[in-house]
Image: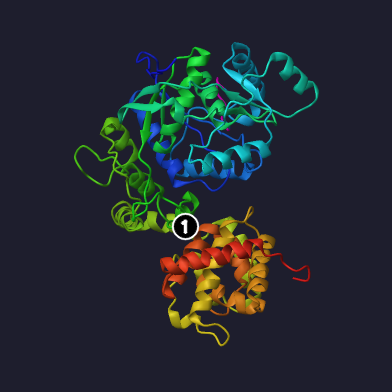
Amino acid sequence: MSNTTASSNSATPVRTRIAPSPTGDPHVGTAYIALFNRCFANQHKGEFILRIEDTDQTRSTARSEQDILRALRWLGLDWAEGPDIGGPHGPYRQSQRSDIYRKHINQLLDSGHAFRCFCTSERLDALRAEQTANKQTPGYDGHCMHLSNAEVSSKMAAGEPYVVRMKVPQEGECVFTDRLRGEIRINWQQIDMQVLMKSDNLPTYHFANVVDDHLMGITHVIRGEEWINSTPKHLLLYQHFGWEPPQFCHMPLLRNPDKSKLSKRKNPTSINYYRDMGYLPEAMVNYLGMMGWTMPDGREKFSLPEMEQSFDIDRVSLGGPVFDIDKLNWLNGKYIREDLDTETFAELYAEWAFDAERLKQVIPLVKERVERFSDVIPLAGFFLSGLLPVTEGDFAHKQLDTEQSRELLQLMAWQLEQLPQWDKPAIEQACRRLSAFKGLKIRETLFPLFVAVTGRAVSVSVIDSMVILGLDVTRARLRYAVEVLGGVSKKQAKALEKTFRDLQDFELPESE
């Protein structure tokens, strides 16, 4: 069938969802999409649910899942059904729905809408290289699509690993209507024969997403615009199963002030960062609500209930909304001045500053170094600060010039971003690797880190400090220190990126 059209039954109760992958810190983009899904559902007296998409078992962690749930709850974006509270459409973790996926993949195989692919990674790599050399769009060539039943059975009996791919029309267009963008047409020749089930029998995002949305009764899929080009695959699956597709609404992506896609290299993107820096959740939600949408009366300060009462998703602007921290700072200050009396301010500040979990980590670092309680703030006040007021002069060192310090800080920031786990051994290893790679003594490598992270050349352990502060605050301080030292030009950035690739390939001597 050359054309596929999405529609929605307006009589069906509205159900929306947020479906994050627990593979890292909770992202402000997740909160942004969750907010608009929740507002839309509540506006229509429907339900907003939460599902965990943890099919990537190598990267998914229970800690990340808990961080996501805690961050969304901190923002006040609660849900009617989810992995923590259950509901009639569970389980709400994809890793617990394997039997459901196997049943549905067998339906597609039996109906001839999917096929087993036995191609090795070597063949696929060679195919991709050949297509790239011929300036063709990389994609699967259908090599296994026409295997006979006997050939498939023989390969399976021999234990050859395989994936399951979907069949895709070779001509015509997929035509669907987006709530914000109107009619969208995508040529089927641009759509690859998507893997639906991996060789480990785990589903891919595209397959599990469609099956779960249908079985959980999702009527409106409100998600980021990066998924527009995947919509034909999803609609084809709905068609193959004979299901009514939901209505699609693709939201504009959040942007950095330079209009590039919001990324952690240019802006803190973790909700945890904003919580740890002392932002109010009400101000954070308010600001996310201003991303591509405005109140009918134009006011910039509004509560979540006020947003829900006035919400109209059709008024979302498609121009890329800019996530501007200066604007967020202004709005947060407005909340502090206008909404907090002295008693409430004191209560919320104490709750933030004297967080029990953080204090348990900080006290052992300072207790052996102070003689009076009044010594604590001068020594450890940086734990309760944002960007530190460091100057270029603070980085003066007998063995390091400005360029060396700037390079060490930038390389360390990039190294820390690559760590699979944020803990003391991993950070220590990164510091030793950089030190050995640059041929420096460890104390020389750590010097600019001390200044950037703690604000002083001599302080409590900088590595312990980074563990407590977390990646986002640490990275923000390293990034700021690089700017204080003159910043990195585009030409310098290219040279540094090459150096960083060499650093990644560098083998740390065992003695290190």
In the picture shown, does residue 282 fall above or below 391? above
The residue sitting at 57% across, 40% down in the picture is: 130
Residue at the left extreme, as displayed: 297
Residue 294 occupies quadrant? top left
Q: Is residue 377 visible?
A: no
Taking the image as shown, residue 248 lies to the left or right of residue 353, namely left
User: How far across and down, in percent of the image, does residue 127 sit?
Assistant: 60, 37
User: How far across and down, in percent of the image, does residue 501 sit?
Assistant: 59, 62
Mark 1 highlights which residue? 265
Taking the image as shown, residue 410 lies to the left or right of residue 178, namely right
Q: Amino acid at mark 1?
A: Arg
Q: Nearer the viewer, residue 125 or 100?
A: 125
SS at mark 1? loop
> Few, some or many C-alpha atoms within 10 Å of disc 1 (few <14, some 14-19, many ≥20)?
few
Magenta stretch? 84-89
State the predominant SS element of the stretch in magenta.
loop
Please say which color scheme the image uses.
Answer: rainbow
Image quadrant where one finds the N terminus: top left
Taking the image as shown, residue 405 lies to the left or right of residue 428, namely left
* Magenta run includes residue 10: no
